[in-house]
Amino acid sequence: MNEFDFRQWSHKAADWSADYLEGIGDRPVRPRVTPGDIAAQIPPSPPETGQAMEEIFADFESLIPGAMTHWQHPRFFAYFPSNAAPAAMVAEQLVTTMAAQCMLWQTSPAATELEIAMVDWLRQAVGLPNGFKGVFQDTASSATLCAVLTMRERALEWTGNQTGLAGGKRLRIYASTRTHSSIDKAAWIAGIGQDNLVKIATDDSPGGTFAMDATALKQAVAEDRAAGHLPAGIIICVGGTSIGACDNVAEICAIAKEEGLYTHLDAAWAGSAMICPEFRHLWAGAEEADSIVLNPHKWLGSGIECSAHFLRDPAPLLNTMAIRPEYLKTYGQDEIVNFSEWSVQLGRRFRALKVWFLLRAYGLEGLRARIRNHVAWTVKLAERLAVEPDFEITTPPILSLFTFKYRPDAADNLDALNRRLIEAINDDGRIYLTQTDFEGSQVIRFSAGQFDTREADVDIAFDVITQVARGMGTG
Ligand SMILES: *Cc1c(COP(=O)(O)O)cnc(C)c1O
């Protein structure tokens, strides 16, 4: 076995990382590769003996970065961002080195106590009341799964984990038609089933936020009770992925209270913006929700994976998720928090360190300035596109997301044209955009949120979109 020079290669990796970030704007955002290109270059079997790091590192450099989609690119305007601030990346290196496993207080005292503190810092940052507790889950999908499991167990009076679901009443969960697919998946995994996730229509009137129709929700719950089903909970959406839909949180929570239903608020993307008081109207009433998820790894700069899962009262979650075999007990420590009891995972990464570095290095004002800029520049871009003769804004900006369509007069198949436009823009490489559908047709999403995006990058987006579209013809 060869001696591994950890210091040398760590320095090399740090230098590589700094160079990568400095030069990232010169790379195409989405690589020009086709499926199988990279796999074809990986040996089919592992080596029997260790290889030189020079060789390994050289292969990394020649094979990997050029075939990556660059989420740190300042002109990444696709999906939602998954941004990582330099200070948070440094924290991640330290965490990786300690290889911390944060399942119990005892296995990671500082990590557990820092996690409690950082969840509370974030709680204050987004303006949730004192009393909300929380945990860092890996992703919003996991937080939502935990919430749906909690809805299930609470509705079953804590018997489901023991007896399973066979033979019982049909559990019912409610969400608007504009919620994220992670809600559907949570219903699948929780054994509730797609057919029992009741999708409620939204109010799409102009000037609104595509919010769940409260009357339709009440009616669906009443019909389910009349049919002998068991309503369990409501998923509330603030900042839906497709077009940024926001439910009326206060109104839905009031219905949930009347009906005795558990509520989970999915603000995976938009939640980060709540550090700015002027955006909190979008989730007015959030303090009434039982469970809330927001992803600092989307728009605050923590780097993936980091989902803040807030709970008005952690007891229902713990009743659902905590399992205490002898080998995980910590005797004589009744007051401690063991975060594996709050999540699906047992083994957990030390996520709080990057949040600590992040919040201290930039301060809330530094983070607010970025989000405010992203929103302002997005609004400006939408205004510029709106007055271009061949473009139409299909859904207005909600925070830093809007959708639009290219619709030149001569075009007949607009869906195909817009799909071709997205491909042409992404092949150009200067920016990266993705699509969604709205009212049955293909539209193009624009979403800003990369940590180091500047106004000039959004201006380039305007140039690329208009130039590529006009260079393409209409056929
Ligand atoms: C991104 C997103 C999710 C899923 O987030 P993960 O952390 O990747 O699981 C869920 N809901 C909304 C609204 C999102 O934008």
Image (cartoon, rainbow, N blue to C red):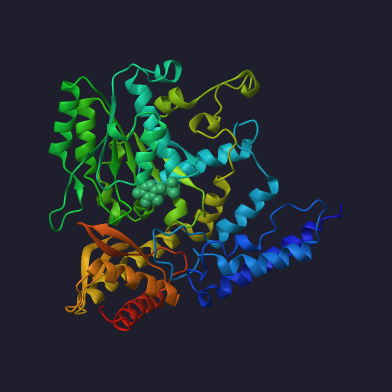
Across and down, in percent, residue 207 comes to: 15, 58
Residue 86 visible in the snapshot: yes
Residue at horizontal 61%, vertical 53%?
92
Q: Nearer the viewer, residue 270 or 387?
A: 387
Across and down, in percent, residue 3 comes to: 86, 55
Across and down, in percent, residue 120 comes to: 45, 41
Q: Nearer the viewer, residue 332 or 235?
A: 235
Going by the image, does 281 lie left or right of 356? left
Q: From this view, report whether residue 285 is shown above or below residue 46.
A: above
Q: Which part of the image, by quadrant, shows the C terminus?
A: bottom left
Across and down, in percent, residue 118 comes to: 50, 44
Residue at horizontal 63%, vertical 18%?
326
Residue 43, quarter of the rendered image? bottom right
Q: From this view, report whether residue 389 is shown above or below residue 328.
A: below
Give the mark count: 0
Residue at horizontal 28%, vertical 71%?
417
Q: Nearer the viewer, residue 354 or 160?
A: 160
